[in-house]
Amino acid sequence: MLAAVRSATVFGVEGRPVTVEVHVSTGLPAFQIVGLPDEACRESRDRVRAAVLSSGLAWPSCRVTVNLAPSNQRKGGSGLDLAIAIGFLAAHGQVPVSQIEGLGFVGELGLDGSLRQVAGVAPMVAAMGDVRPVVPVGNYREAWCVAGGGVRVARTLREVVDALNADAPWPQLPDGEFVDDEPPLPDLADVRGQVMARQGLEVAAAGGHHMLLVGPPGSGKTMLAQRIPGLLPMLEPEVSLQATMVHSAAGVRLPAGGMVQRAPFRAPHHSSSMVALVGGGSTSLRPGEISLAHGGVLFLDELGEFAPSVLDGLRQPLEEGVIRLARARASAALPAKFLLVAATNPCPCGGGGPGDCQCDEVARLRYVRRLSGPLLDRFDLRVGVTRPGVEDLLASGGGEPTADVAARVGAARQCALDRIGMVNANIPASYLDSLAPLHQAARQLLRDQLERDQLTGRGYHRIRRVARTITDLQGGGELVLDEHVQLALSMRVRLSISSRERAA
Amino acid sequence: MSTVQLAGSELPPEAYVASLAGFRNMNVHRLGALLRHHAPEEAWAVVLGQRPSDGLIGKVLEVSGVRDMWKRCAQERPPAEIWARCIALGLQVLPYGHQHYPAGLLDDPFPPPVLFAKGDLKLLAGRRVGIVGTRNATAAGREAARSLGLGLGAAGVHVISGLARGIDGYAHRGVLAAEGEGRPIGIVASGLDVVYPREHRDLWEAAGNCGLLLSEAPPGVPPEPHRFPLRNRIVAALSEVLVVVESRERGGSLITAAQAIERDVTVMAVPGSIGKRASLGTNSLLCDGAAPVTGVEDVLTALSLQNTRSAMLPADLRARPRGEDIAVYRVVHADPRTIDGVMLALGFSLVEAAMSLARLESAGWVAQADGWFECVGSPLR
């Protein structure tokens, strides 16, 4: 009359094990779920009952009580449907209780008894520990990535019940390697001209430097940004697992291979809310765009159009690589280590070359007020992008293809990792003198810049890190040369809007 | 009251005028009438009701509430205090007819009854050009205002403007940058101790120190909206030539232009491209017969001055470009360029172009914004 089934829910990007206890007794017919279920969870009463009946199983008149333990934590989502149904069938004796030992059940039920995929299966399976997970077919790959070979799949509730009663074997799916069905990434060879911007992309990818692209509409800022993931190396196994967990928890489609192995590219629209960007929500703390970009690129087009408060929310994760969300009932730390690439017009009207701007002062001031501040300071690279000229567009043969650039980027990244175990953008200021020693001429160049007040203390360190990356990319030695520093300085364009505000 | 009366025996007449000018409901007409019919001390007594009055003021005082209000104002603004404040701020108080009162305003149809001044009043005897325009200026307008100010300043012409945001401010920045004989003359709507707009504090100080600041309002008066058109008539009256740089279809600068036409002051306008909102006003002035300004020479010609600008410009002290930098400079001088553009034009590598542009920038020949390099200052000769 009593059965306990193992399942899990997801919170943030972590699964939380849940034991579904079902008690069936005589009494007034009723079906109750206790243990802080949310709305979707409470509605599973109706789904489970209908699914059991449609599967040709019995639902007699009896009193059914379901407890979701631990009962002091909120549970959300529909992933517990299957566990509740199996718990009921076991408690009612339609499935032997001994057969559900060592199994964990995750999945949503349809009224016809079909099993539907749910979000967050990867972290759930990880949380259930040493059980063989039973999951919907659509979730097989991600469960397989976490649990390996022991995953059971089913298309319907009936298939699960038959397998448990040993009337039929567990359904089989092709195992092992999966074909990568992802579309090819856009190639850098498509980009015409834009020598400076290409160089900027290469440096950003090699050193993990956050980048701001400044240019008029139609100059190809988005096109350039989309090509950064192709330059980044495949994710490290650890990061890949974290990214997979995040994608799974957020219900974002995973690649056919199951694991997120390519650097993700996320480009939220500028109307995105704070919660959409950093993550949140009352019951499950769903990961936001910055966590989905973990290990990859977060691209913010039209940076000036984002709400200032939303952008300020990025500052802490940019520093720490993790976003700590706290709510009254719970808190969670979600991974958020991403390369920030942003694009902005030089002014509200879009500008263009000098003299093309038609904005009045008030509009410019309003624009710069949104852009200015500590966020702009976090971009190591500020690269100007211009509309390609006629010669560039008509020229036959594209630029250097992604594969060639990616090879250089990979070598430079390896160089940095061998040196200190992190990308150059993260070198602590105190290590710069030993890791990025300056040539005499380079030191003089920086001294000039500092004396002419063109560089702040923070900017000085950023330039040195970027220069280190450029040296690595050119296969240079230990010493950072003046031309590398100059190139780094050229990749930090002055913004006309912010400089004019200071002048006024 | 007794202390004021005691001090009154030593107070100059200007102290009473300064106090009266700050009364509520004391507009320019009323103050003008009051001072036309009475000497300042007498006017003070009239306002307090201690003496009979005649003319307009007699009628005004009969209006209900005015007499009481002015009595209250008189208590709030004892002349001794106002006078002390003017002295502390270094202001000169110039009632109409004062020996230093600007001669250009004496025969004005609507002269200010009193002016507050800080700086060198002798500048008003020099050559003067007014430069006015919209606060919402475009980049082109700002540059035009700055270069006109620069050229006039170098030619020894004083520039009159309103110290407002946009065109006014840039004209004065140009004058100050020229470091020539020409000085900024700022005519403002608020009291001379109420800086408006606040970001122009440096310009106020510069105008007060090396030029001239004038206001019709006594110290402490905030920049009330109705004071700006009144200020504009003084700009028009004191200018020999008025240049409108950019103006929208309805703007304060068009009021200034209309006032200037009334006073037979030459009005000139800087042409702008059609359809650009900031040029609608100036282009309509051109249609109405204002002379176009295509450079500072046009303004100097209108003043019948020899074009001696180049001779008076400060010497160019920048280190001359050498080697490949000369070619890079020529390219950038022909047209603003990005680093990519310089590479393409000269076949340089990215590093070569960046290094060369950096050398030119640090020597002060080019400036960079949003990735574009532009020439600044005088070109290679």
Image (spheres, coloured by chain):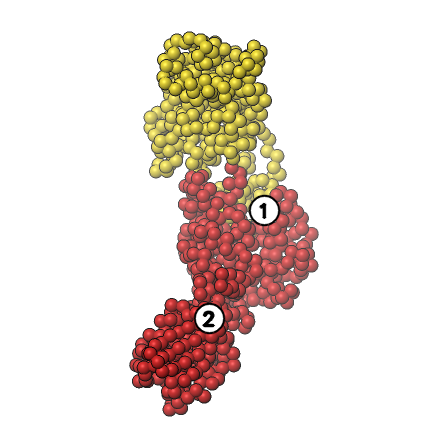
Chain colours: A red, B yellow
Where is residue A8 drawn, in percent x and y? 46, 75
Amino acid, disc 2:
Val
Question: Which of the two marks, 1 or 2, is nearer to us in this view?
Answer: 2
Question: Which residue occupies 52% across, 12% down?
Answer: B13
- Distance from label 1 to label 2 (Cα)? 54 Å
- Answer whether residue A13 is visible to the viewer in this image: yes
- Answer whether residue A194 is visible to the viewer in this image: no
Observer-nearest of B381 and A455: A455
Furthest residue to the bottom?
A: A167
Residue on which the image places disc 1: B358
Few, some or many residues within 10 Å of mark 1 (<14, 14–19, 20+): many
Report in which chain the residue with disc 2 lies. A
Observer-nearest of A145 and A356: A145
Question: Which residue occupies 53% across, 20% down?
Answer: B82
Q: What is the quadrant of residue A119 in the picture?
A: bottom left
Observer-nearest of B74 and A433: B74
Question: Which residue occupies 68% across, 54% down?
Answer: A439
Q: What is the quadrant of residue B108 in the picture?
A: top left
Furthest residue to the front?
A: A27
Report in which chain the residue with disc 1 lies. B
Residue on which the image places disc 2: A10
Question: Which residue occupies 49% across, 33% down?
Answer: B197
Name the element at disc 1.
helix
Name the element at disc 2.
strand
Amino acid, disc 1:
Ala
